[in-house]
């Protein structure tokens, strides 16, 4: 729609073909499209500018978000709409629309590795929580008897918004959207109070429902739209000595007036159950368990180790003497160091990187929106997209390079959140620019990096061995004594592909578990570009590293080496998943586009 054509105006000619219908035929109803006046997204769901469909909040579905969804919140987009009068929730879930977890194991399905979920029920929001409340005002319950009245309430930490739905006999009567919200918990010796306070609220009726025009009931539709404005709050109070105000209460000045006039009560009183699925480490107040120190056991382990070390030293000394006598030669200095270096290479912890809903906003400009995916150890993940699509920005965010804007979303290492410092210790980042000193040799360059970046208590011989090891790994050992060189300097130096591999080697000396590379093939000819990527594949597969890089217009022989692909356009995901299934996905889109353009041509 870049030429200013709206979806609605594109669709208008489609209806034109029905104008020639024979007399007497009723006009065809319009397909649902929320751009038209007659259609509306309930629950204040957003109307998609591209396809005219409603984006419903969790637990609601159908074309206009009117239908409660059943099953479990963990089923995501595959939730079944309600068929009868009530939802059958899956084990571990409850609520009119099955959004509230009741057991930890129900949350496992929402965790990236399928385990470690906690159903956090304390009522305060961490990311997005859901509450199921029974209305407890006696006057209201007497008036609607034998029906029941319930409220669902959920809040989102990212957007600082909440939403509220009022249900009678599990049929939604009206709903509200609250914004500019904040929440707090106050826990003293006397009481525990959780408050959700929002500056603004707007409410709407579901037409034809109880309180909203159903036969025999009042219609508060106009009152809701005109009088309810805020501020609104949901306050949950538990007094340890007991108080008449214990429980939850929803308050809004105009709503309180209405409740007081009709039922004589001060506010809507509620009894709520709350649930939010979190990782154990995300639960507020979580502290990592400290292992108990068992002094006698430690003393015996130390004694055992000391005896073992003495035995090893004596045995080694005996065999070394025998070998020295046998060979009539000296024992080589640094023997065994090669093993140490190889161990460093192999002994790293394989790490899966999962990222969910990553977005980035810089000074009001939305650069990235909702990017998710997972890269497993031993895999190559390529981030592709046109120039300006956001590849480098996204790679920087994954590598946790300092960014000036606001980063949103979650990142997990082997299913757990990691602090920035811990994270930076296990990742390496290779920049697009070559920042190598032209006057050093390949060996000197990599050794300098090893000396500067490996731990101070690691022996010099191990560091030297490590530099040699990575040169062999990356196939640059044969040029170890050549100068890096530069275009301007005398003599050409090593090739662009070799320079790129030297840059990678400088990062690899620390044996990172996850390696990020920004455009590792840029400026290289086809042969060198393939060699660099092939060498990254060997690194990932042989040493179980996770390799993630951005790449621009790779040739087909390079593309065939990818395990995971993220394709971006204007900061949004076009495709994220295994490379093996992307072709089928693009074919399915192509068919869809062909069908759309054919129907447009007909009209
Ligand atoms: N510091 C910044 N200030 C303003 N805009 C920025 C900044 N950083 C990135 N952008 C914008 O974000 C978008 C994505 O930039 P990015 O460099 O990530 O794209 P890219 O896909 O890596 O492009 P290329 O392939 O050309 O390197 C661009 O529109 C860019 O102008």
Image (spheres, rainbow, N blue to C red):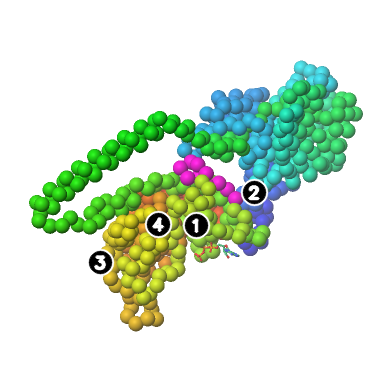
Reading the image, the residue beneath label 2 is 48
In primary-sequence order, the first of circles 3 and 4 is 4
Q: Which residue is mark 4?
A: 456
Does the magenta stretch mainly form a helix, a strand or a loop?
strand
Outermost residue, top side: 146
Which residue lies under the disc numbered 3? 478
| N-term-proximal mark, 3 vs 2 | 2
Residue 236 placement, left or right of 380 = right
Look at mark 1 in the image and give the residue it sits on: 395
Quadrant, the C terminus:
bottom right
Give how far apart the Cα atoms at labels 4 and 1 are.
30 Å
Cα–Cα span, label 4 and label 2: 56 Å
User: Quick check: is 168 in the magenta stretch?
Assistant: no
N-term mark: 1 or 2: 2
Q: Position of residue 202 (x, y in %)?
A: 78, 42
Query: Residue 456 placed where, x, y %?
Result: 40, 57
Q: Residues within 10 Å of mark 1 (few under 14, many from 20)?
A: some
The alpha-carbon separation of the residues under discs 1 and 2 comes to: 28 Å
Q: Are marks 3 and 4 in contact (CB under 8 Å)?
A: no
**If the picture is divided into quarters, which one holds ligand 1?**
bottom right
Q: Nearer the viewer, mark 1 or mark 2?
A: 1
Between 359 and 467, the one lying in front of the other is: 467
Quadrant in which residue 551 is drawn: bottom left
What residue is drawn where x is 35% and y is 32%?
300
Q: Is mark 1 within 8 Å of ligand 1?
A: yes
Percent from the top left, x then y, of residue 13?
65, 53
On screen, residue 340 versus residue 597, left or right, reads left
Q: Residue at 64% x, 49% y: name it.
A: 48
Residue depicted at x 45% and y 59% = 429
Counting residues from the start of the chain, the first of labels 4 and 2 encountered is 2
């Amino acid at each position: 729609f870049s030429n200013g054509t709206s979806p609605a105006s594109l669709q208008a000619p489609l209806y034109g073909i029905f104008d020639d219908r024979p007399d007497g035929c009723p006009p065809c109803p319009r397909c649902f499209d929320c751009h038209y006046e007659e259609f509306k997204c309930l629950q204040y769901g957003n109307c998609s500018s591209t396809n005219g469909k409603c984006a419903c909040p969790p637990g609601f579905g159908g074309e206009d978000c009117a239908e409660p969804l059943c099953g479990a919140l963990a089923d995501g987009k595959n939730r079944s709409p309600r068929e009868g009068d009530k939802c059958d929730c899956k084990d571990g879930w409850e609520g009119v629309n099955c959004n509230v977890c009741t057991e930890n194991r129900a949350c496992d399905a929402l965790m990236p590795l399928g385990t470690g979920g906690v159903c956090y029920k304390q009522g305060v929001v961490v990311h997005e929580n859901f509450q199921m409340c029974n209305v407890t005002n006696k006057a209201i319950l007497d008036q609607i008897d034998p029906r029941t009245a319930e409220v669902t309430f959920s809040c989102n930490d990212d957007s600082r918004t909440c939403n509220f739905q009022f249900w009678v006999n599990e049929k939604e009567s009206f709903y509200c959207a609250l914004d500019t919200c904040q929440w707090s918990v106050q826990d003293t010796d006397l009481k525990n109070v959780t408050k959700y306070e929002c500056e603004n609220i707007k409410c709407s009726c579901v037409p034809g429902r109880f309180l909203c025009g159903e036969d025999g009931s009042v219609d508060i539709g106009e009152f809701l739209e005109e009088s309810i404005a805020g501020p609104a709050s949901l306050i949950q109070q538990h007094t340890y000595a007991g108080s008449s105000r214990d429980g939850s209460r929803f308050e809004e000045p105009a709503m309180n007036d209405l409740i007081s006039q009709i039922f004589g009560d001060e506010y809507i009183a509620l009894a709520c159950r709350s649930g939010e699925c979190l990782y154990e480490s995300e639960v507020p107040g979580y502290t990592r368990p400290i292992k108990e120190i068992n002094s006698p056991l430690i003393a015996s382990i130390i004694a055992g180790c000391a005896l073992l070390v003495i035995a090893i030293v004596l045995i080694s000394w005996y065999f070394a003497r025998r070998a020295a006598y046998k060979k009539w030669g000296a024992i080589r200095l640094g023997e065994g160091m090669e093993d140490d270096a190889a161990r460093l290479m192999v002994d790293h912890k394989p790490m899966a990187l999962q990222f969910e809903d990553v977005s980035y906003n810089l000074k009001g400009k939305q650069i990235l929106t909702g990017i998710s995916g997972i890269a497993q150890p031993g895999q190559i993940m390529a981030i592709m997209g046109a120039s300006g699509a956001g590849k480098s920005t996204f790679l920087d965010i994954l590598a946790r390079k300092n960014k000036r804007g606001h980063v949103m979303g979650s990142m997990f290492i082997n299913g757990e959140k990691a602090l920035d410092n811990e994270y930076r210790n296990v990742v390496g980042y290779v920049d697009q620019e070559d920042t190598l000193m032209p006057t050093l040799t390949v060996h000197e360059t990599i050794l300098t990096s090893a000396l500067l970046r490996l731990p101070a208590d690691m022996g010099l011989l191990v560091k030297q061995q490590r530099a040699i090891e990575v040169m062999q790994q990356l196939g640059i050992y044969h040029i170890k004594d050549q100068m890096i060189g530069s275009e301007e300097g005398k003599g050409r130096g090593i090739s662009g592909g070799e320079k790129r591999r030297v840059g990678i080697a400088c990062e690899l000396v620390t044996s990172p578990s996850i390696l990020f590379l920004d455009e590792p093939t840029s400026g290289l000819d086809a042969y060198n570009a393939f060699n660099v990527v092939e060498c990254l594949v060997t690194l990932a597969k042989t040493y179980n590293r996770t390799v993630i890089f951005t790449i621009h217009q790779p040739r087909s022989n390079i593309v065939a080496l990818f395990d995971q692909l993220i394709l971006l356009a204007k900061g949004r995901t076009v495709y994220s998943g295994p490379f093996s299934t992307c072709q089928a996905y693009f074919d399915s889109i192509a068919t869809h586009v062909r069908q759309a353009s054919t129907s447009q041509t007909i009209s």
